């Protein structure tokens, strides 16, 4: 394993594809040879992580998060001997990884708002056409209870028609399953 470390046949692995503020990142130094990653011999070596926000951690697997978006540098030092580790000498292998911590995005995008507005417009238009198309005169002739039931059924029908139009690939929209 020491030869693999010296030959740089290992690298820092981050479990997230995109790093965001306050989102935990699981980091590890992973070997190219898979069997080395869980070898008992790893207990004889130490891994010291240095983060550019001033924090350090020890271990082969660590968890860390950043508070602000920025370009970050992560360093993992692996002293190759116990004497080097205690004396602070340079008999160590160092791995460095650049990381871009991106700004948190809003869950409401323009496309989401446009789709919601379009769904509302479809449902509203169908209900409006139903009322204007003669239902108003018919509702005026009914008693209170039948009129309320008719308005409810008209609204329910408009919602069902809206859900049919907004299905994706034969699947009901999320609002239809609620």
Image (cartoon, helix red, strand yellow):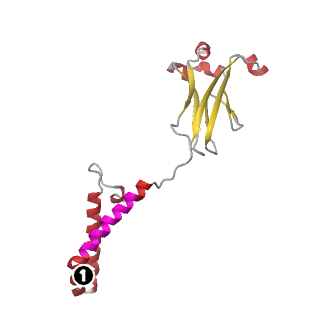
**Is residue 86 inside the magenta stretch?**
no
Q: Is residue 157 visible?
A: yes
The residue depicted at 52 percent of the width and 39 percent of the height is 18
Question: In this figure, which residue is indicated by the disc labeled 1?
Answer: 136
Span colored in magenta: 114-130
The answer to which of 95 and 178 lies nearer the viewer is 95
Dominant secondary structure of the magenta stretch?
helix
Answer whether residue 38 is visible to the viewer in this image. no
Picture coordinates of residue 21, whole percent (x, y): 59, 45
* Displayed quadrant of residue 145: bottom left
Q: Position of residue 118 (x, y in %)?
A: 34, 61
Residue under the image location 52 percent in, 49 percent down: 105
Residue 109: quarter of image:
bottom left
Circle 1 SS class: helix
Whether residue 129 sits left or right of residue 83 in the image: it is left
Residue 52 vs residue 24, the one in the foreground: 52
Q: Quadrant of residue 125?
A: bottom left
Q: Position of residue 58 (x, y in %)?
A: 67, 30
Q: Quadrant of the C terminus?
A: bottom left
**Which residue is at the far right?**
87
């Amino acid at each position: 394993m020491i030869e693999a470390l010296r030959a740089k046949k290992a690298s820092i692995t981050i479990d997230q594809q995109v790093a965001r503020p306050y989102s935990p990142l699981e980091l590890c130094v992973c070997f190219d040879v898979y069997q080395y990653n869980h070898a008992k011999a790893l207990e004889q070596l130490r891994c010291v992580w240095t983060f550019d926000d001033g924090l350090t951690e020890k271990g082969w697997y660590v968890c860390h998060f950043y508070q602000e978006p920025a370009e970050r540098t992560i360093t993992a030092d692996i002293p190759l001997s116990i004497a080097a580790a205690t004396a602070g000498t340079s008999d160590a292998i160092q791995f460095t990884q650049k990381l871009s911590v991106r700004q948190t995005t809003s869950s409401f995008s323009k496309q989401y708002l446009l789709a919601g507005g379009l769904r509302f417009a479809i449902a509203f238009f169908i209900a409006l056409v139903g009322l204007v198309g003669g239902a108003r005169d018919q509702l005026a002739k009914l008693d209170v209870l039948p009129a309320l039931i008719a308005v409810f059924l008209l609204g329910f029908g408009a919602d069902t028609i809206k859900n049919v139009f907004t299905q994706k690939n034969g699947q009901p929209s999320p609002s239809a399953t609620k």
